[in-house]
Image (cartoon, helix red, strand yellow):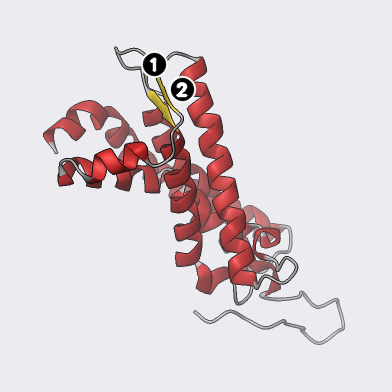
Amino acid sequence: MTQVWRDWGPVLVASAVALPLAGLVAVLLTRLRRRSGLPVRVAAWRSVAEIGMVAGTLPWIWMILTPRPAPRTLDPVPLRGLVDLLTGSPAVAVVQIGGNLLVFAALGFFAPIRFAALSRPAGPLRRTASGALRLLAVGAAGSVLVETLQYALDLGRVSAVDDVLVNGAGAMLAALAARRWWADGDPDRVAVPARPGDPERSSPRRSE
């Protein structure tokens, strides 16, 4: 824990300070959308999802792209690094694997809430499977970009295939954790504003 604080203390402090600001921005976005005529539920979900994706991902990207005084390393062999971690210190394994699972977890959680296209059925796949696989791909793609930057910028870090696999898995697991908010109905289907003179129309609501 001491090592984590020593390495990432500034990032943790900055993230804690930024949380109230992120909440304020979400409130302001919700109010702006309400003024444009969106139902409060839709406006709030969209705003929270957008801010959540950004605020929950940027600190991890900051950590990953922080230079270290070491030579850059490339590890293209799948699962080799994971096996080494799992056969070593349990504490190190928890920190390393847990951290990699969380890198794109916020993106995986909030993206299918904000963007209904990410959870639409594809061919024979059900909506849950389609959404999970899409977020696996999104998380893996983001990880490939980050790992490429690490190596290209010579940041003194290990660019590993295992990181891509675990980052993608983290996004997928987070998407599945948010399933009740997207697989059974996306925020855009909460309400259909009625035209002047028409009775209010609404579409099926999600369960709380």
Residue sitting at x 61%, y 62%: 131
- Residue 126 visible in image: yes
Residue sitting at x 12%, y 34%: 2
Report x, y in % for residue 159: 43, 27
Viewer-nearest residue: 118 or 122? 122
Viewer-nearest residue: 165 or 95? 165
Please give the label number shown on residue 49.
none
Viewer-nearest residue: 133 or 37? 133
Residue sticking out furthest to the bottom: 199
Circle 2 residue: 150
- Residue 113 visible in image: no
Inspect the image, locate mark 2, and give the three-letter code of the amino acid beneath it.
Gln
Residue 72, picture quadrant: top left
Quadrant of the drawing holding the N terminus: top left
Q: CA distance from mark 2 to mark 1?
A: 8 Å
The answer to whether the residues at label 2 and label 1 have Cβ atoms under 8 Å apart is: yes
Report x, y in % for residue 144: 54, 34
Above or below residue 22? Residue 31 is: below
Viewer-nearest residue: 191 or 150? 150
Q: Is residue 187 left or right of residue 195?
A: left
* Helix, strand or loop status at disc 2: helix
Q: Of the two numbered discs 2 and 1 on the same chain, state the one appearing first in sequence.
A: 1
Above or below residue 173? Residue 2 is: above
Inspect the image, locate mark 1, and give the three-letter code of the amino acid beneath it.
Arg
Please give the label number shown on residue 72.
1
